[in-house]
């Protein structure tokens, strides 16, 4: 005879309800994970496409919901810089290729929902035009001339602080761009949009120290103070550190030619691997989100990438040959591929250029950064404090204007003049090229309308120093400029 079930009916019902609640809880947890945290891999046809649009790990911590980001310029045009001639994110100097969902240097990655993050190409992608109405040419790994990272951060903070930054307004704008599901609308209304607003306001507060220091302007950035002052990174106090690190953005091409050289403007590290990893952290990645293997592919790409050739036909080969002789006599020791001082740190007291960038990187910064990643398989141990600036090889020098570490001299022609003859005020961020002077157009109505007013009298903007070659006769300086076009 079968055993009787002595369980009380109420107990059985209670167990059934418990099972149902557990199942519902699991379903809610699974849905929450899927909608908020699942990570979809990105796919690119080439490493160059990955360089332009791939994730470097910034989306989990610093990424913005793509559809929120997409509609911000439409909702808050009053917070964009300029006079309205350039609309949308173009007002901030980004480069947007036709047919792409994001500008160059902005990664679109799904982590629960589509998010947008910054990558290396946002700052390290050059553009130039051969005439005001000419095609804008894009050069991967070159120094960006037009993107203004500080203005971008300001725009995001100002938009978040605007009373019209509400779920109703944002969802109405998003509805014009895409159709969200009912569940997504709920998540955006009650979770994603409020959290985005809080995060942007927190970011604005974190960068409030920049308001008391000279503007970066397009094509420049303070690369390490944001890392020094970030509470989750080096956690130094900006109220106790008034240094100015404003620096011209550097090219990243042909890095194999700099093997063993001191890197960054002041030579604070000589490991390209550490420079790439720390660059991703500076852009907003965190140790547990770094795609270390993909960044290794990026490093290999930068090692082999050739700089662009000078694109203008008007070049005097005979004068360039004469200039090559002058280069070997006056410049090659510090800037030639076989130069004894190429890739080494030249003391600031010798080179004489503005010392603010050098003062920004301190011995305490070195200690904290080298200790930052000690719990991870990769590590930092090559950061150092130096006493000057690196004598860089001049590969692709024609597209690296303005010149000096702070971008304070607009053209090579100006750099070969004594400091008192260099422009005191000029406009940078206008990417129409001036082939005869080896630099971008930096004066006149168009430059003023489209550019950023750069005043060399502001702290950190000094244009003195590096007066090598300024004593040459004018015809020799012209020949030297002609030769530099070939590098």
Image: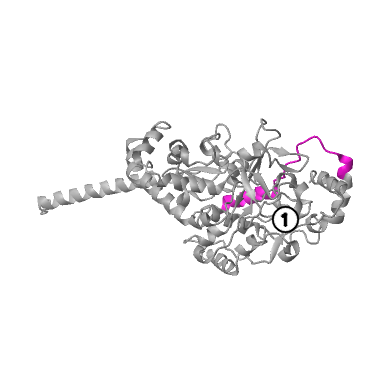
Classify residue 340 as left or right of residue 273. Answer: right
Q: Position of residue 301 (x, y in %)?
A: 66, 47
Crowd class of label 1 (few under 14; some 14 to 19; many from 20; radius 10 Å):
some
Considering depth in this image, is 353 or 28 the residue closer to the camera? Answer: 353
Image height check: is 430 above or below 233? above
Do we see residue 235 in this rendering?
Answer: no
Q: Position of residue 72 (x, y in %)?
A: 45, 39
Image height check: is 379 above or below 75? below
Considering depth in this image, is 357 or 84 the residue closer to the camera? Answer: 84
Q: Quadrant of residue 351?
A: bottom right
Please report the bounds of the magenta region as a residue range: 292-320
The residue shown at (77%, 59%) is: 342
The residue shown at (68%, 41%) is: 443
Image height check: is 274 above or below 217? below
Number of dots carrying numbers: 1
**Magenta stretch encompasses residue 259:** no
- Dot 1: element: helix
Classify residue 424 as left or right of residue 32. Answer: right
Which residue is labeled 1 in the image? 258
Q: Position of residue 474 (x, y in %)?
A: 85, 48
Q: Quadrant of residue 179?
A: top left
**Magenta stretch encompasses residue 300:** yes
Q: Position of residue 254 (x, y in %)?
A: 71, 49
The residue shown at (47%, 38%) is: 77
Q: What color scheme is it?
A: one colour
Considering depth in this image, is 117 or 220 the residue closer to the camera? Answer: 220
Classify residue 267 as left or right of residue 198. Answer: right
Do we see residue 60 in this rendering?
Answer: yes
């Amino acid at each position: 005879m079968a055993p009787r079930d002595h369980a009380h009916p109420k107990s059985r019902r209670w167990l059934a309800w418990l099972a149902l609640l557990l199942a519902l809880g699991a379903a809610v947890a699974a849905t929450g994970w899927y909608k908020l945290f699942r990570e979809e891999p990105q796919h690119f046809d080439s490493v160059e496409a990955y360089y332009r649009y791939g994730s470097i790990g910034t989306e989990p911590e610093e990424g913005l919901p793509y559809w929120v980001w997409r509609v911000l310029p439409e909702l808050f045009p009053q917070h964009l810089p300029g006079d309205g001639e350039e609309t949308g994110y173009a007002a901030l100097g980004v480069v947007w290729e036709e047919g792409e969902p994001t500008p160059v240097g902005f990664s679109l990655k799904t982590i629960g929902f589509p998010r947008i993050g910054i990558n290396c190409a946002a700052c390290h992608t050059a553009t130039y035009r051969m005439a005001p109405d000419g095609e804008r040419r894009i050069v991967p790994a070159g120094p960006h001339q037009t993107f203004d990272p500080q203005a971008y951060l300001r725009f995001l903070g100002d938009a978040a602080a605007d009373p019209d930054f509400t779920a109703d307004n944002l969802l109405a704008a998003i509805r014009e761009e895409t159709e969200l599901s009912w569940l997504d609308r709920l998540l955006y209304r009650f979770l994603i949009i409020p959290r985005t607003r809080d995060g942007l306001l927190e970011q604005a507060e974190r960068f409030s120290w920049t308001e008391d220091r000279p503007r970066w302007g397009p094509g420049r950035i303070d690369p390490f103070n944001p890392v020094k002052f970030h509470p989750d990174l080096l956690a130094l106090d900006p109220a106790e550190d008034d240094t100015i690190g404003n620096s011209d953005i550097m090219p990243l091409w042909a890095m194999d030619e700099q093997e063993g050289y001191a890197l960054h403007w002041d030579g604070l590290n000589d490991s390209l691997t550490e420079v790439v990893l720390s660059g991703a952290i500076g852009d907003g990645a965190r140790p547990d989100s770094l795609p270390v293997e993909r960044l290794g592919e990026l490093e290999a790409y930068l090692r082999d990438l050739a700089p662009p050739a000078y694109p203008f036909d008007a070049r005097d080969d005979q004068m360039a040959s004469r200039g090559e002789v002058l280069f070997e006599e006056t410049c090659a020791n510090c800037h030639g591929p076989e130069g004894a001082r190429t890739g080494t740190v030249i003391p600031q007291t010798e080179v004489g250029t503005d010392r603010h960038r050098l003062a920004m990187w301190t011995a305490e910064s070195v200690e904290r950064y080298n200790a930052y990643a000690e719990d991870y398989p990769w590590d930092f141990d090559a950061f150092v404090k130096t006493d000057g600036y690196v004598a860089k090889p001049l590969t692709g020098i024609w597209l690296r204007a303005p010149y000096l570490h702070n971008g304070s001299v607009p053209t090579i022609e100006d750099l070969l003049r004594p400091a008192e003859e260099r422009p005191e005020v000029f406009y940078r961020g206008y990417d129409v090229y001036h082939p005869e002077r080896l630099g971008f157009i930096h004066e006149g109505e168009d430059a003023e309308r489209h550019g950023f007013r750069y005043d060399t009298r502001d702290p950190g903007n000094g244009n003195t120093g590096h007066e090598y070659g300024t004593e040459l006769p004018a015809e020799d300086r012209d020949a030297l400029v002609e030769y530099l076009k070939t590098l």
